[in-house]
């Protein structure tokens, strides 16, 4: 549903358009003074899940306070003046991709609303696959929408519920939505966390001196010195109040389907998700890849930064030396947003430079996490060839991505995914490598310590690789025109 | 309802706290290319009705575009980049006082929403006196509120109406609200303008090469070269489409009660409201004042800028020379917002300086538009005395303001209005003048060319002078605690 | 010398191009805590002398602190954070027109430099007529220049002087420059003020609780509650230290030639310059004008704001009623800097609107301060005619301006001054008025209480009216190509 | 000389204070259209040499254009509007650490000046060790200084020289200064590059389609697709004009002393300096370190990012697995500049997080590039211990840094360098590691492919390790009070 908005942001030729994006991060804390400061730190640790805007809502026992800003957390929320406008010992926060500018701020979370029972705020990571269908029904009942975000749908469901208290309403709302969600909610009395019945997106519980914390990843606990308690369970709703924590399981239990791509790319390597360390999984991915798709080469070179752990694993398993043959310039930041045409053409060179001395005359194995449209891979291979590589072999730390994600990741439509329209051989020709190898789906399952993919009932959501979506895709099934239902322009 | 918000902005000692504020301005145009540019010019001409934030919503036949910015129109909306984000030949706009910062932008109008029937936007000047009561009822039906503005209430009423089209719903909504309102609304098909049944706030209709325009004052027509057609009537709803204009009168007709204070202070002197020229009325006010409250003095000095026309009238009627004895520094703008303490103490001196050479040894008649808390008058009188005036006589171009306004003007509560707790003699002592004269209420009526105030059925809303409110004050009658119902902090 | 810079700022069609500009303001204070705050207030009062940039240099007994910012004083210098970076009890400041942006800041004063004897700062109002000639000579001696301001020339002269202390060097430097200057300088020990031998630009001395103050106009004394002591004399150098004040007169005395245009337009009406109150002079100008150039009309209407006092005088002398028939919108501020083309075309309408009800069917006398290129007058007359005036008569509160100023005022070149290429009759045709009258030069002298202009030795600098420049114009006499000597682009 | 300035920026407790800083980067290009765009790209590639401010001066055959901005190149120079203000086919640029704010911009390079012979601009990497002494002499001759940068000294030397043309004057100036410098200069006719006689700082020559380029490092050639030609030689002055390039060697040849710390830390790993690839040297440093200071451990963990190549080398030589056990958050950018106190305390945690799963129960070898004050090392060791490491061994990829640098690197004074006041054992205790090993000075020389350090005549400048400065330190020898000669406050 945010699709329109993002197409307005990145044209198809930009490096940003050739990547998976839009994985948001959420954070919540209850009962700790300077809650907003801790929330700011937590969001900073989750910055890799969304760099374009962030928001925090705090509550001081009397009132709610809302701050939402475009830009990096560290640039916008660390000022004393901003934090002073967020008093209280309870807060939730959100970091996301979003358009810049006044109007676009409407989509920046958390969303705050007042309903019959009082005020509350919601922050959401994921995507509801029946949001438009529900929205249409809600509008029939008189609801109005002012953003293009599916989170607003959830707010209305809470308000229109006939549940007797906020928790009842929250659960009532959950029962009406489908898709992937990890939610944190803040009402006058409670901090609530919830994951969808399949547990597609992550959410963990932490503890700081007796105060509970909810966060998308464990790295957000580490930065504030909080202790990891456990992952919120699939389909679980936790309610945190002054009296402690309680769990609710409003759904009939089903086998879980955690997003396997979190391990491949989204999550920070130092996070632990569902009992697995991300860096550790990535290294094992590299090891599996070296076994499945070996290569006679002189050096293993990661496409930085996301390809580094798999490249280390590949190197260790293959015995081929690991070398930082491509250097990444980290000073790009939020820069080059409106570059002059001549600079825009530089594309990938603004971020990556091959180290000719390491590469010249060598047979190089490039390790990258995935191929989306293939245009970035093409350019990086060309850079490496220009730097004098004798051979360039590409090894991809995941199976071919053939289907778009409808669970909170911004992917190009199917027709633009290179793997959906080419064989591996054709892809190798397209990106001009001497050989191209992807990890198999079973290799990926082995890397996460499963013996193999259970075809009957896959242990993870791997729809981007297999096209097997674990939920109904209601909004997709309905007339596709519904997707352009919003009359609000993306930059508005 | 915006009260909380404003108290956060201006502390009680600031000159801003000792004035009437919060008169918004609205503008709408249908069927003219570059509608947003014309809207920008119109709002610039209405800038005196609100300087802190503005917004424009345009529609290009396919989508709505929203821009809302803190700051002066000329600083925020004149950039090509902003106007390019507002395509289309239809637009409405709004200028207002508002808090600065991200969160506070939630209250900046126009409000945009999508309901069952499509998208629409509303801009509002006035105040609904039953907004909280209605809001409570709406929340019972599941509505959520995310601003502290009564305009959001109106949006919900439209969406929840069972009217068959937008106009039906709009009128249905109007019938549920009480108070003062001049509204402009933009739907996919229509530009709508409406005034409350008493016609408390102004709204005029103009024409530019066959395209209709709605604006709070005629000065907004002048700037774009539009022709004044007529004032929208009290209780009238005008609907402008590609086919022309049509009028609806959904309310039983009642005698009108236009805000008489618009003539005294709010409106721009070059505007014509309800058939009267504002400058002309102000001059006559000065003439009446000279007759009612004569004074043996050497010079007539206005407190600039609002006191100038009345002072000219006073001078012409009394034969005492008119002199610009106090010079106003117009470079204050949006400045001194966060001044250091030492500068903040300067208060009124940042804006006003008496011209000692004109004042020294003279008996001075100071003419000002009104007295609110009296603190500013006190300081100006002191400045004039320090400049060597032999005598200082104050003449006020309106009756004593004794009661707060609930119709869209931000006034201090009754207890803080100087005239509500002091006799004129005590007020003269308080502001330290040799004599103090207010215009009588009948004098004010004569200045607007009425023979006298009709006590049975006053021709204007003059509640701030008389305490006779022309509508029920539902929200005031209900438990006053309801006023703090919003859990959203003003700076949030 | 700043010419290049200004042509880059305002294109010839802008209203700004049709006005006199570039009168800077200076301020200095010695021995008062929070000197920078007081300096900020003083510069705010002098804001009419230059709105585009300002700077303050303070000294705390150990170090100098420099802040220079583009924008209004109240927007840039009132923040606590800025004032905290300007500690000390001594400060000088400057306000000016200047280009915006990084590079252009090089020309923002005060200038700070360190020479053999220590650090010092200089702020300058005026223009040196031999700056380029001196600059060339200094460069021969090895001096480097990094701005396009003549003030930098003065810095070098001080540094290269062989005077035994700062004062000696300062006076030595003064002796080498020609033209108009009112300077304030701050060294480690002294605050210095100086006026050129003819006293062309103003500079006054004030006293605040025993601390001395220097300022361009008395209104800057008023705002901080300082007492006016006297005007600095033509050719005088005052030296203020902890021990008090001392005067030096390094030049042979000559008859003074104060800029008469300060009375007509530049100075604030509440200031007193050389013993005359500006407002008072302007009113007398109006009276003289009414006598010299009477007019059978219904109302006297000033072009606001500068035409107001003369219009009051004209009305009082002629008995024709004074009316505010044109309303000025003061919210223009620093706005409309980069407006879209469609808004740019509005030109004068952004600022001025005639009040049709006052004007319609009337014979109007418009009173303005001067005519520069005539394009603005043309537009205002058209506005007044469009508002229905039966006749429009223009009366100008000064003689025709026929020659450019080389003493610190930014005027168009001679060929662009309307009066230099047209007779009064032709000018009347050009601006389309029924009659046009200028004040005579003797009328202007009478208004400043001189019996008449002394043709042998004029009492004022009136070169803009007479072309009789009171000093040599060295840089003009030298090959005119020297004017483009600076290789530094204006926007750099 | 910039010392004061930097102490104002970073307090001693900040992570920034515990690092070497202030290595600037320079770039120049002659005869290529859109020179400023190419310069922007080159500076972006050199961003690691200074992140706080940058400047570009271009020349279009008629005028010079100057833009200087605080912030990252990509944020400030990539806008079309900025690049349009820098026309021409010749440009030089500079990137540096600098204070933020208006005043501090005075120290941002390139510096531009006009002297007798015309305009010119200079950008400088390095530090003159006799700048204050020369400055004092120049001031005696009448020179004025308005920055605290030694580059201004160089400008004056050029202007005061009696050389017959710009090149003569440039060389004349070079002969009067001592210390380390790599300079690029742009006059109306020429692009000049120069290195000091010892060749302490780097400067390379490149070629892009026949146009010459000068840059601090080869990575700035790579980004624009330029060909590396050669390093500018120690003591060489190259002059690039439309006719080609010519070399001058104004100094008697002496053995060169390139800064060995460029290899250890400053330069980008993909750059080649003096014939050596930086990444390659760093890996060999790791190998030498593994041989000299072996360690019985389970994993080798770099302190990212600077420790990575040495850690790879250490791992390969020792056979201990290389693991990314500490994850770096790159979204810090220019953030956390004014953080609230509570966030400021987080210090190193804002950037680094250990990956507990990789570290828990392991014996860890941490590899870092150097130890400055030791406070950051202390914190990182603590993080690693808190993450459950069984043993923590620290290996430093350079010898102990015992002496400050006077050649363009901002180092703490000697007393604050941990190695200058503690034995290695005490340092190990201080940072709380189980063992601590530094590379020996001979090990470092072997890593750069020298058999060993030549004690008689060292092949490199290694003063930070040995205290043997290759030049006189004139300013240090003179009364140390001279260091505070500048009266201009750092924030001014």
Image (cartoon, coloured by chain):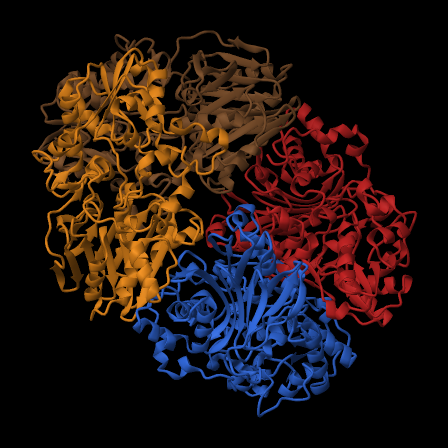
Chain colours: A brown, B red, C blue, D orange
**How far from the left and from the top, in percent, is residue B482?**
74, 29
- Of A131 and D117, nearer the camera is D117
Residue at the limit of the structure toward the bottom, as seen here: C456
Left or right: A149, with B383 as reference point: left
**How far from the left and from the top, in percent, is residue D376?**
34, 28
Left or right: B55, with B124 as reference point: left
- Of B272 and D277, nearer the camera is D277
- Of B164 and B74, nearer the camera is B74
Quadrant of the image occupied by residue D47: top left
Residue D49 sits above or below residue A407 on the image: below
In what quadrant of the picture does the N terminus of chain A appear?
top left
**How far from the left and from the top, in percent, is residue D190?**
21, 63
Query: Total marks drawn?
Result: 0
- Of C296 and D120, nearer the camera is D120
Instruction: Specify whether residue D64 is in view.
Output: no
Which residue is located at x 75 percent, y 52 percent? Answer: B376
Residue B419 sits above or below residue B303 on the image: above
Residue B372 sits above or below residue C286 on the image: above
**How far from the left and from the top, in percent, is residue D44?**
29, 45
Instruction: Specify whether residue C161 is in view.
Output: yes
Residue B378 sits above or below residue A166 on the image: below
Left or right: B190, with D76 as reference point: right
Quadrant of the image occupied by residue C478: bottom left
């Amino acid at each position: 549903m945010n699709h329109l908005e993002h197409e307005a942001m990145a044209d198809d030729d930009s490096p940003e358009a050739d990547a998976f994006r839009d994985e948001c991060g959420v954070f919540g804390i209850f009962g700790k003074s300077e809650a907003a400061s801790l929330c700011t730190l937590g969001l900073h640790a989750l910055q890799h899940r969304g760099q374009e805007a962030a928001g925090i809502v705090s509550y001081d026992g009397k009132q709610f306070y809302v701050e939402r800003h475009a830009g990096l957390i560290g640039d916008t929320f660390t000022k004393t003046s901003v934090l002073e406008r967020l008093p209280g010992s309870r807060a939730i926060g959100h970091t996301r991709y979003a358009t810049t500018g006044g109007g676009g701020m409407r989509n920046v979370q958390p969303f705050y609303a007042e309903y019959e029972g009082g005020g509350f705020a919601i922050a959401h990571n994921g995507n509801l696959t029946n949001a438009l269908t529900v929205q249409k029904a809600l509008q029939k009942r008189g609801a109005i929408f002012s953003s293009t975000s599916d989170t607003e749908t959830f707010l209305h469901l809470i308000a229109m519920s006939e549940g007797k208290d906020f928790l009842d309403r929250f659960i009532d709302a959950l029962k009406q939505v489908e898709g992937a969600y990890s939610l944190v909610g803040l009402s006058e009395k409670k901090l609530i966390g919830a994951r969808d019945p399949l547990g597609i997106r992550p959410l963990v519980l932490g503890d700081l001196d007796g105060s509970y914390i909810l966060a998308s990843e464990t790295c957000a606990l580490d930065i504030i010195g909080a202790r990891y308690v456990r992952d919120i369970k699939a389909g679980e709703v936790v309610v945190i109040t002054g009296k402690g924590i309680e769990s609710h399981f409003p759904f009939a239990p089903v086998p879980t389907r955690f997003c396997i791509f979190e391990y491949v790319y989204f999550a920070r390597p130092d996070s632990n998700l569902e009992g697995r360390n991300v860096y550790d999984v990535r290294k094992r991915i590299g090891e599996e890849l070296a076994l499945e798709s070996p290569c006679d080469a002189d050096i293993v070179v990661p496409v930085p930064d996301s390809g580094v752990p798999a490249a280390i694993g590949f190197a260790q398993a293959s015995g081929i030396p690991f070398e930082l043959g491509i250097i990444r310039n980290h000073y790009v930041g939020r820069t080059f947003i409106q570059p002059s045409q001549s600079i825009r053409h530089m594309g990938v060179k603004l971020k990556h430079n091959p180290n000719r001395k390491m590469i010249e005359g060598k047979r190089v194995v490039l390790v990258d996490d995935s191929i989306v449209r293939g245009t970035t891979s093409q350019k990086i291979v060309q850079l490496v060839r220009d730097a004098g590589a004798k051979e360039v072999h590409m090894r991809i730390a995941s199976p071919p991505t053939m289907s778009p994600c409808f669970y909170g990741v911004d992917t190009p439509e199917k027709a633009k995914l290179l793997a959906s329209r080419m064989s591996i051989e054709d892809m190798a020709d397209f990106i001009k490598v001497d050989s191209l190898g992807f990890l198999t789906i079973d290799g990926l399952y082995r890397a996460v310590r499963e013996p193999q993919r259970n075809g009957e009932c896959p242990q993870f959501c791997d729809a981007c690789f297999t096209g097997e979506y674990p939920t109904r895709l209601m909004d997709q099934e309905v007339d596709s025109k519904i997707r352009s239902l919003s009359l609000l322009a993306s930059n508005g």
